[in-house]
Image (cartoon, rainbow, N blue to C red):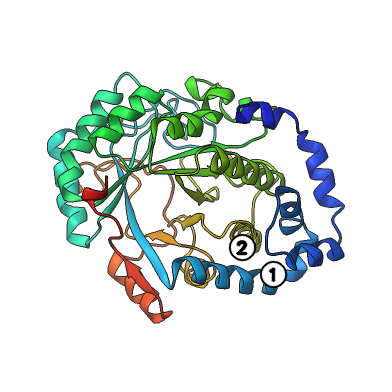
Amino acid sequence: MNFLEILSKFNWDEIGEKIDKITPQDVEKVLEKEVISEQDFLALVSKAGENYLEIFAKKSKERTQRRFGKTIQLYLPLYLSNVCTNQCVYCGFNHTNKIKRIILSDEQILQEVTAIKQMGYEHILLVTGEASKKVGVDYLENAIKLIKPSFASISAEIQPLEVEEYKRLIAAGLNSVYIYQETYNQEKYPFYHLKGKKRDFAYRLATPERLGEAGIYRIGLGALLGLENWRVEAFFMALHLRFLQKRFWKTKYSLSFPRMRPYEGQFLPPNPVSEKELAQLIWAFRIFDEDVEISLSTRESQNFRDNMMTLGVTSMSAGSKTEPGGYASCVTELEQFEVNDNREASELEAAIKQHGYEAVWKDWDKVFS
Ligand code: SF4
């Protein structure tokens, strides 16, 4: 059975109603458990759960320290291209936006690499829009081979691919792929994804399964917070995570919680998520799963990231530029989203130290690949 078949057994509104009915007593019972089921998880993301946030934070901190120690892994996104054939209503790279489109050349990629290496990074996240003709597998394979000698670990946030295509990129040096469903609400999904390949909900949803089959080291999941009811969204994310963990048990998993930020466009998130709610969500996932990695990007404020760095998060970026060519300033164009925490990597490292944690620049070596 694939995950789409599992998802189809649930009704979005019914899950929402179930979460609304959760009582403080239900939350207390779940907090006493060591092993949390997907059904238990509903209590952790409920409104009733808001009354227990101090306990959530404490449990999340303990579980994170038990599994990861006092460490925060550092990574940096490298935007290779802003060309995109999709029309996602919430994104600055949306193909109807009249911005200059850029695909970094080999020389420009290497200029970016030089600038990024000066910051000390060993983990790089390659990001592109989705344009299979102009920024297809050949381009990505070439880019990975080009940068592989400079970094210990290479991740990517790129268009969904076929199993054989992923295998090619893994052979070239790719370690992890982050693929965000944006929303698990199948009925509403088309309203946010107006045109392009990304409109195909089922194909996107099956992408982590294709990644698992291709044998990728790490799969990243996420939903775009602000689109739909985050409590229901979180339940389906938890369901997806458990499904993948059972099926591809050798693979590592990572979660991200991108919260909608301003971009060049008029789209306002219909269901905005507050910082307090985001914290509840992160702690709920940590209580649910001790092993999963959780990252928090520069979309969030310095204050929030500093507060969260000891309470459940395991990786962070700093000094991020979300436009292609942004590090070496070889080209400057529109950012995909506005960065909220503008600290340099060294400043984030100092903040991590101040909190009694260690910034990890490298926990992986090319020879492991
Ligand atoms: S979210 Fe991704 S696929 Fe959608 S418009 Fe932006 S870059 Fe393209």
Horizontal relation, residue 260 to residue 11: left or right: left
Bin the neighbour count of mark 2 within 10 Å (Cα to Cα): few under 14, some 14-19, many 20 and up: many
Three-letter residue code for mark 2: Trp
Position of residue 72 relative to residue 195, above or below, is below
Residue found at x 68% / y 31%: 6
**Cβ atoms under marks 2 and 1 closer than 8 Å:** yes
Residue 179 locus on image (x, y percent): 47, 38
The residue lying at 28 percent from left, 60 percent from top is 362
Q: Of the residues under marks 2 and 1, which one precedes in the sequence? A: 1
The answer to whether 173 appears left or right of 20 in the picture is left
Q: Which residue is mark 1?
A: 53
Image quadrant containing the C terminus = top left
How many labels, in total? 2
- Residue on which disc 2 sits: 283
Q: Is residue 345 left or right of residue 269?
A: left
Residue 223 in view (yes/no): no
**Which quadrant of the structure image shows residue 279?**
bottom right
Residue 133 placement (x, y as % from top left): 32, 18
What kind of element bears circle 1?
Answer: helix
**What's under tag 1, amino acid-wise?**
Leu
Q: Residue at x 35, y 46 (%)?
A: 322
For residue 137, say whether it is visible: yes
Q: Which mark is residue 39?
A: none
Q: Secondary structure at mark 2?
A: helix
Please identify the quadrant where the N terminus is shown.
top right
Q: Relative to 143, is 202 above or below?
A: above
Question: In which of the image's four quarters is ligand 1 placed?
Answer: top left
The local crowd at label 1, few if under 14, some if 14 to 19, many if 20 or more residues have their Cα within 10 Å, is some
Question: Disc 2 and disc 1: Cα gap in Å?
Answer: 8 Å
Picture residue at 54% right of the left edge, 32% below the top: 89
